[in-house]
Image (cartoon, helix red, strand yellow):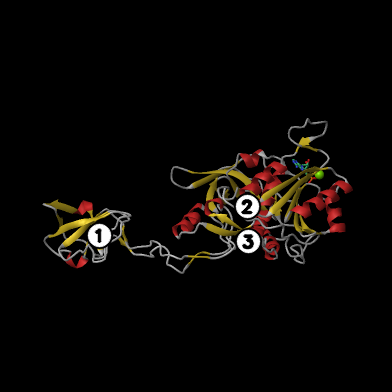
Amino acid sequence: MATTKTHPHDPLPAGIDPCDVPSHGHQALRLAEARDRIVRDILPVQGRETLPLLAALGRVLAEDVRATVDVPFHRNSAMDGYALAGAGLPAAGTASFEVVGTSWAGHPFDGPVGPGQCVRIMTGASVPEATDTVVMQEHVRLVDGRAVIEPGHRLGQNVRPAGEDIRRGDVALRAGTPLTPARLGVLASIGVSEVVVRRRPRVAVFSTGDELRSVGEPLGPGQIYDSNRATLHGMLSRLEADVIDLGIIPDTREATLDAFQSASRQADLIVTSGGVSVGDADYVTETLERHGQIGFWKIAMKPGKPIACGRFGPALFFGLPGNPVSVMVTFYHVVRPALLALMGVVEPDPPVLLRATCTTRLRKKPGRLEFQRGVYERDASGRYAVRSTGHQGAGVLRSMSEANCFIVLPLEHGDVEPGSEVDVQPFAGLI
Ligand code: AMP
Ligand code: MG
């Protein structure tokens, strides 16, 4: 890969506190409100790097990019056909034009074209100066080296003006835009070979719990494998974060403090799972209270117990519940928007919601926004139908892995009977 310039660790400016309105003990906040409050105060990482265009997929532009050329660069043909001056098109009867040359893509015809003359032209080839109209070849009869044309054509047809796509001097893409394949193409079309992007956010991840073992280790009595680091690693990597895996931290005061100190030296954001629920062997809360800042967001959503949020040194912190499904749901709906803000994404794509007919019965108590897991598909009539993946326990990760969408049930909603309409949020583009 070509040279890249990496900047040193540049922590978030101190003094911003996304946890300024903890709602522990108060009425639970609606998810959208909590998310807005959390995201509002997050400043993007300041470091920038210059990358070769093809290495920048998924990264976020740090500066506006202006076009220094028109796209297309020259007036060109949208069809294979014949270029001529449209004034000579027949209104009735036929007209015939002498073919005086050929304009190939990349090899323009540079001779004169007079009235009664035309030029054979290929798609993408420059339209000769004296011409303004292209008649597609399927509409032309060649008779003795002359192009015979019927009525029914329009002056100016099949000609793509210079600058039709992007005009020289315009902002082609704004700072804060994530680079998708189409946007790499736009940048290439204006001749950009290097882009200035924000550096990737560094996210430290660790799991807490004496019951946890890493894959590759044998399980003892009462132990389980740590799956949260695997899902978090996947979700963070999809978002182009640099993941720093700090492993499993045992439930002790010393180990927890060590882990936070190590994490905050390396990372912009610390994401932990487990150990923040009431009554736990809870050193996460204690460590943050003593050495950092912590607040609890009681969000009226399910799954997702109170989510802890705070700072340790310069690093932002989210403490997610331990249950594997809760981790994924709270990540997507709370951490992901925060991470996008940290990445410098200015206008994240709004969530996609589809209306679907629910074919299974869903149990739901009013009072919380629920993200049940479902499988949706288009039925023969072109409408969406969705069914539950079954057991919706917060520990049942299979409900996520078999699903292709969240079934989003509003706060006030009760049970859903088969045949009712529900909102569905596809995983595509989200997960
Ligand atoms: P906690 O929030 O620590 O009380 O954990 C809630 C539940 O999630 C418990 O059943 C834990 O064993 C489980 N759990 C916590 N962390 C993990 C993890 N990293 N991987 C899988 N399960 C976990
Ligand atoms: Mg625990």
Q: As drawn, is 152 to the left or to the right of 243? A: left
Q: Residues within 10 Å of mark 2 (few under 14, many from 20)?
A: many
Q: Are marks 1 and 2 in contact (CB under 8 Å)?
A: no
Residue that numbered label 1 is attached to: 134
Q: Nearer the viewer, residue 148 or 97?
A: 97
The image shows residue 116, relative to residue 234, as above or below, that is below
* Mark 3 lies within 8 Å of ligand 1 (Cβ measured): no
Q: Residues within 10 Å of mark 1 (few under 14, many from 20)?
A: many
Q: Are marks 3 and 2 in contact (CB under 8 Å)?
A: no
Residue that numbered label 2 is attached to: 409
Q: Nearer the viewer, mark 3 or mark 2?
A: 3
Q: Nearer the viewer, mark 1 or mark 2?
A: 1
Q: As drawn, is 296 to the left or to the right of 335? A: right
Amino acid residing under circle 1 = Val
Q: Nearer the viewer, residue 121 or 165?
A: 121
Instruction: Point out the tag, 3 or 2, that comes first from the N-terminus.
Output: 3
Amino acid residing under circle 3 = Gly
Amino acid residing under circle 2 = Leu
Q: CA distance from mark 3 to mark 1?
A: 45 Å
Q: Nearer the viewer, residue 194 or 27?
A: 194
Q: As drawn, is 366 to the left or to the right of 261? A: left
Instruction: Point out the tag, 1 or 2, that comes first from the N-terminus.
Output: 1
Q: Is residue 411 visible?
A: no
In x, y percent, where is residue 399?
A: 64, 40
Q: CA distance from mark 1 to mark 2?
A: 55 Å
Q: Residues within 10 Å of mark 3 (few under 14, many from 20)?
A: many
Q: CA distance from mark 3 to mark 2?
A: 30 Å
Mark 1: secondary structure: strand
Disc marking residue 344: 3
**Residue depicted at x 26% and y 62%:** 128
* Mark 1 lies within 8 Å of ligand 1 (Cβ measured): no
